[in-house]
Each structure stands twice: as structure tokens, then as C-alpha cells.
Image (tube, rainbow, N blue to C red):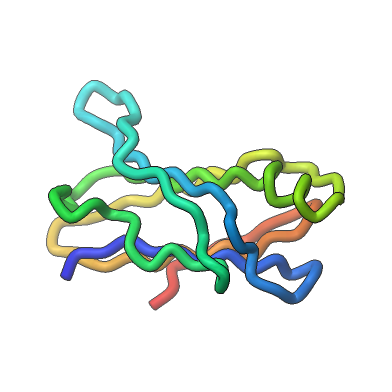
């Protein structure tokens, strides 16, 4: 199964970042970004499948954009980064990507999960 998923944890609160808007995009051959999917994290801070069923996970550049401002606003805190964008490369033959985001008001980190 071909898959792109994410999990967002708010490390300042030690909780999942639920209901956080996430956008998946792919860069086309002209260098333009095309939206593939719009989603929101579930109650556990997860989007288990962002790649639309009809979409092929071909080699190229993909980007996840997280609307962190809405999460911070809902928590009644100020954050430095209103949007976190993570660009990653899919190489030929790769089929599954899990891209977690560890979020706090003044920083974030990410890695390739499993």
C-alpha cells in the first residue's frame, strides 16, 4: 500500500495536536505546487493516510503544510511559526512515508518515522 501519514505532538503540553489542518502538495514538472489533499489531524493527532486513493506516489518532491497558527490560537497561546512546511523527496520504488511533527510554540522538529 502506498501511503503518506503524519502524527503531530504538542510537546509543550505533552498531548497530540488534534484538529490541526494539514495540506499535502506535490511539485509538478513546471515547478508549481499542486494540492493533493486537505485534512485535519484526528483526536490522537494523526492523519493516517494523506495520499488520495487515486493518486500515485511517484518519485518527486512532496510537501506537508501544517496550519500551526490555528492550533496555537485554540490553545490560547502565541506561537512563532504560523505555518510549518516540510518538503521531502520520494525516490523511485519508495512506497510509505510517515512524517511526524513535534511542535511547541517556539520550535518544531521532524523526522522520517516508520
Question: With 22 as the anchor, is 84 left or right in this view?
Answer: right
Q: Residue furthest right?
A: 77
Quadrant into which the C terminus falls:
bottom left
Residue 32 located left or right of residue 1 = right
- The spot of residue 22 in percent (x, y) is 49, 48
Q: Is residue 74 above or below residue 41?
A: above
Q: Dividing the image into 4 quarters, which one contains the N terminus?
A: bottom left
Residue at x 44% of width, y 68% of height: 112
Occupied quadrant, residue 32: top left
Q: Residue at x 80, y 67 (%)?
A: 12
User: What residue is rendered at 68% in x and 44% in y?
Assistant: 70
Residue 73 shown left or right of residue 37 in the figure: right
- In the displayed structure, 18 sits above or below 27; it is below
Q: Position of residue 101 (x, y in %)?
A: 57, 62
- 72 displayed left or right of 109: right
In front of the other: 88 or 44: 44
| Residue name at image x 75 percent, y 59 percent | 104
State the count of labels.
Answer: 0
Q: Quadrant of residue 4?
A: bottom left
Where does the image place residue 72, in percent across and percent down from the top left? Answer: 76, 49
Amino acid at each position: 500500500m502506498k501511503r503518506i501519514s503524519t502524527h503531530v505532538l504538542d510537546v509543550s503540553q505533552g498531548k497530540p495536536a488534534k484538529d490541526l489542518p494539514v495540506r499535502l502538495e506535490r511539485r509538478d514538472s513546471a515547478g508549481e505546487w499542486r494540492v493533493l489533499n486537505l485534512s485535519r489531524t484526528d483526536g490522537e493527532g494523526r492523519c493516517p493516510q494523506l495520499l488520495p486513493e487515486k493518486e500515485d506516489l511517484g518519485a518527486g518532491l512532496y510537501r506537508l503544510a501544517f496550519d500551526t497558527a490555528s492550533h496555537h490560537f485554540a490553545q490560547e497561546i502565541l506561537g512563532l511559526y504560523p505555518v510549518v512546511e516540510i518538503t521531502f523527496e520520494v525516490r523511485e520504488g519508495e512506497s510509505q512515508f510517515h512524517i511526524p511533527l513535534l511542535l511547541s510554540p517556539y520550535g518544531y522538529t521532524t523526522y522520517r518515522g516508520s
